[in-house]
Amino acid sequence: MEIIQKIIIHKYSIMLYIKMILKKSNKNYYILFISFFTFSLFFLGFFLRENSAGAGGYNGDFGHVWNNLLLFKNFGFWEGVDATAGIGENKYKSSRPPLIYILNAFFNPFSNSKESYIISIFFFSIFTFILFFLTLKKKYDKELDNSSIFLISSIILLSPYFRTSSYWGLEENFGLFTSIISVFFFKKIQLKNFLNIKIDLFLLALFSSAAVYFGQNLIIIPLYFFLNIVLNAQVDVLKKIQLFFYYIIFSIPFFYLILIWDNILPAVDSEARETLSKISFNHIGYSLTIIAFYIFPFLFFKEKNILELFLEKFKSYKIIFILLFFIVGFYFINVISPLEREPLGNGVIYKFFLLFFKNFVISKYFLYLSFIISAIIILLYIDDTRDYFLMSYLLLSSTIIAPLYQEYFDPILLIMLLLFFYTKITFSIKKLLFLYSYFFIFFVVANVYYKSNLFLFFKS
């Protein structure tokens, strides 16, 4: 009788184990199916020449990209650089430094025709996605399996801005690549406990510096890593000096560009955008709504629910003081630089209120309310003071950008939330599916809004 009982218990244990394996296997297949669907959708968007961010098309931003590329291909390095300063008859039209065009003109063998160049940037963007997966794996390897990491990394393939840049050879994805690979080398350095890191330290400085040459707004990338290493007591003084030396060397070409531009932007764009000559304080409010839009789904990745977070945070007088500061600040913003109907930019929330309310006066009140709600969402999410540094930079830097486009935050903010931020988040299959669904809906809405070829394909 005792033997039979043992056999039954043993058999029951085996059945439970098999059931658990099958359940886990089904979960992985489900996640991999969604990831494969997203990857297929990314390829479909390329073949249909999707334009879900409004900047795509041969008559869109690609026209400027191709003309800038021809400057360097036809006239050489120095004349191309001079063109960024408005010197000579050739005009360089971009708000970014010319490194993108220098690399592609002299090192991309597929830059001789528009079509081959676009295809080369598309495959470069796929490599950027693979690099994102590998970097996430390096950070979350102990918390998540490969299928879950693959699902998270595939979310950038839903970004209308990443997609449009991938399909139309635009500039943005180069900055994403260098930002992600910088994290990759930083994680390598951390895993080595800051020992035997000479080559990794050099590569970290090289790629994080390159990010700035692909977009001035990415100056936060080298600054973030520099402060993390310099303020770390584990790192010896010699390595800190070495890193400082690398950054000084890599910054020299940019100082030269600032000298010939007399600005932080190339001459033509700095004049058109009134960069450094005009401060737009109302952009802080718009930036809050854009940032909160990306942070909101991550609120559900916190250990506590939203109500618990709210009650906990607002027990602190410090949080109430910050919120009051925002409210009073927005009042003065309305006096200094009041909200006006603008044809370009300002993010998804701004566009929603413009579409929903025909009367701009009414939409202004809802916009101010959305600024406050967005500030609350951000305050609820952040629980590490180091993340306030990143947030402050994003808000303050937006005041010198005109117009303020959502593409300045997407998908770099998503990448920063997953790779840069210290705020603790927890994962589960339900949370991951919610995150994916959230950005999938945004992807669909963007395609409908811009009436892209992908939207027309599915509509027909």
Image (cartoon, helix red, strand yellow):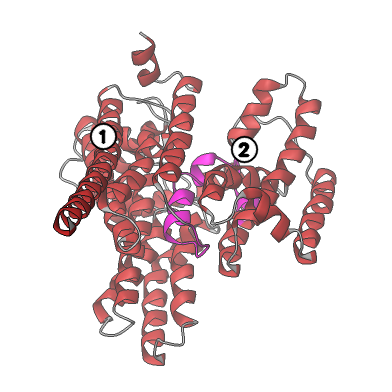
In the figure, residue 115 lies in which quadrant?
A: top left
Which label sits in the foreground, 2 or 1? 1
Reply yes or no: does residue 27 show up in magenta.
no
* Residue furthest out toward the bottom: 237
Name the spot of residue 316 as percent of width and height, x first.
76, 65
In the figure, residue 197 lies in which quadrant?
A: bottom left
Q: Nearer the viewer, residue 45 or 218?
A: 45
Label drawn at residue 346: 2
Q: Residue at x 72, y 49 (%)?
A: 281
- First-in-chain label (2 vs 1): 1
Q: Is any part of residue 274 visible from this angle?
A: no
Count how many numbered circles sit on residues in the image: 2
Name the spot of residue 278 as percent of width and height, x first.
69, 50
Label drawn at residue 332: none
The residue to which callout 1 is attached is 33
Three-letter amino acid code of the residue under disc 2: Asn
* Residue furthest out toward the front: 1
Image quadrant occupied by the C terminus: top left
Tell me which segment is drawn in magenta.
397-425
Q: Nearer the viewer, residue 157 or 317?
A: 317
Three-letter amino acid code of the residue under disc 1: Phe
Q: Nearer the viewer, residue 261 or 288?
A: 288
Callout 1: 10 Å neighbours few (<14), some, many (20+)?
some
